[in-house]
Image (tube, rainbow, N blue to C red):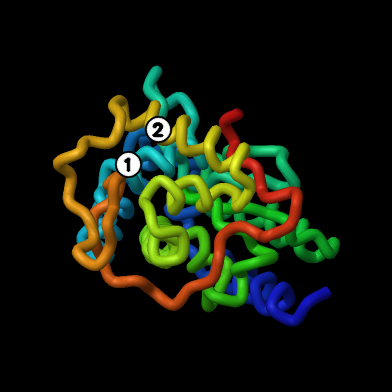
């Protein structure tokens, strides 16, 4: 087992042990909509911090962790995709227990949270599993990564597609899903980075972060929950 996996498991157990009893209740006992809103609130905060348009972040979160909440597609923060099999949990505690058990068995190809960040490739970028599941931390990591992808690929379309995969076919299909959730094609008058000739301004300008890729360069990138 990798060292960072051991750290993640230990931090998860300590975090769960310290939770007040009320925080261990299933999310549905509180409000499904309130829990779903955690991802949107996190997306809004990440957008303000990074410069990535909130509508793009919200659309990506719905592709990555979307489920029906009161008849409407909404992102779910306690989402886990293990080797392509997605699960929605009622609480952060249940989701973390599931992931901790998988890590203890040597499994790490696991995507978690609003924006489905992969534990194998990015677990070491977070202080703990709790931080990876935290909607705000999850969203900020995703936003910063989108900015680095723009700098790498030279267009916002390339950045959004590469968030899922660096292979053109899969990237194009993913981009179409994101655009579909946004409800309209990219608007030519949208803001863009001043230092690029950006013909497809899906995203607004922002400062790039120093984070690594959310996707691997191998032939089998992590799959989104919605196909």
Q: Quadrant of residue 182?
A: top left
Report the side of 131 relative to 167 (left or right): left
Q: Quadrant of residue 140?
A: bottom left
Q: Is residue 10 above or below residue 181?
A: below
Query: Residue at the location (60% across, 28% down)?
Result: 227
- Residue 20 visible here: no
SS class of the residue under badge 1? Answer: helix
Quarter of the picture containing the N terminus is: bottom right
| Residue 92 image point, x, y percent | 52, 52
Name the residue nearer the viewer: 193 or 33. 193
Find residue 60 and name its label. Answer: none
Residue 117 point in image, percent of width and height:
55, 57
Residue at (31%, 51%) from the top-left corner?
Answer: 43
Q: Nearer the observer, disc 1 or disc 2? A: 2
Q: Which residue is mark 1?
A: 37
In terms of image quadrants, where is residue 138? bottom left
């Amino acid at each position: 087992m990798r060292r960072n996996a051991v750290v993640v498991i230990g931090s998860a157990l300590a975090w769960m042990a310290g939770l007040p009893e009320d925080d261990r209740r299933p999310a549905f006992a509180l409000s499904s909509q309130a829990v779903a809103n955690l991802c949107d609130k996190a997306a809004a905060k990440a957008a303000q911090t990074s410069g990535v348009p909130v509508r793009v972040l919200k659309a990506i979160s719905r592709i990555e962790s979307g489920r029906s909440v009161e008849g409407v597609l909404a992102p779910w923060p306690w989402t886990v995709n293990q080797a392509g099999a997605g699960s929605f949990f009622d609480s952060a505690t249940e989701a973390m227990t599931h992931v901790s058990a998988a890590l203890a068995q040597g499994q790490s190809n696991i995507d978690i949270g609003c924006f489905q960040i992969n534990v194998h490739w990015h677990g070491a970028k977070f202080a703990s599993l709790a931080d990876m599941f935290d909607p705000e931390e999850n969203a900020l990591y995703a936003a910063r990564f989108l900015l680095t992808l723009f700098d790498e690929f030279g267009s916002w379309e390339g950045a959004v597609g590469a968030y899922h995969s660096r292979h053109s076919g899969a990237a194009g299909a993913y981009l179409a899903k994101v655009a579909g959730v946004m409800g309209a094609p990219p608007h030519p008058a949208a803001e863009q980075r001043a230092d690029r000739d950006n013909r497809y301004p899906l995203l607004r300008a922002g400062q790039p972060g120093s984070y690594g890729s959310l996707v691997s360069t191998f032939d089998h990138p992590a799959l989104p929950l919605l196909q």
